Image (cartoon, rainbow, N blue to C red):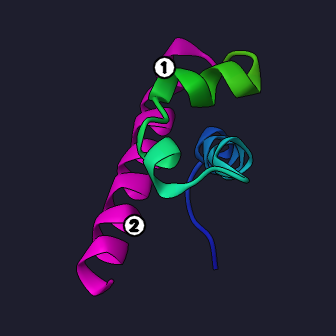
Amino acid sequence: MVTGCAAFHACGSALCEVIRDKNLDEAEKITEEDIISYLGKIPKAKAHCACLAKKTLEKAIKKYKERN
């Protein structure tokens, strides 16, 4: 089950596309602006969704590094 608003789903999907074919160092450099830019734009009231997607990526990379 997935929860969250449409903007968060869009940002999560955009993040997946933005990091595709990137190595770990490149993925760490992805910014919220990169996510929004990939989408074209999102309402200012939903810009925090890109922040949430970026924070999720940061946590995933941290866990990966801890395990490897």
Label 1 Cα crowd, 10 Å radius (few <14 / some 14-19 / many 20+) = few
Residue located beneath label 1 in the image: 45
Q: Secondary structure at mark 1?
A: helix
Q: Would you say 52 lies left or right of 10 here?
A: left
Work out which residue is located at the far left of the displayed protein and give it. 66
Mark 1 vs 2, N-terminal side: 1
Q: Residue at x 43, y 36 (%)?
A: 29
Numbered badge on residue 60 = 2
Q: Residue at x 48, y 56 (%)?
A: 24
Relative vertical location of residue 6 with respect to residue 4 in this rendering, above or below? above
Residue 17 in the image: state x and y as whole percent: 74, 47
Q: Residue at x 72, y 26 (%)?
A: 38
**In front: 28, or 9?**
28
Q: Secondary structure at mark 2?
A: helix
Work out which residue is located at the far bottom of the displayed protein and give it. 67
Q: Quadrant of the N terminus?
A: bottom right
Point out the stretch of residues depicted in magenta.
42-68
Q: CA distance from mark 1 to mark 2?
A: 25 Å
Residue 65 in the image: state x and y as whole percent: 30, 72
Q: Quadrant of the C terminus?
A: bottom left
Relative vertical location of residue 61 with respect to residue 63 in this rendering, above or below? above
Residue 31 in the image: state x and y as whole percent: 46, 29
Mainly helix, strand or loop, the magenta region?
Answer: helix
**In front: 18, or 10?**
18
Q: Residue at x 62, y 71 (%)?
A: 2
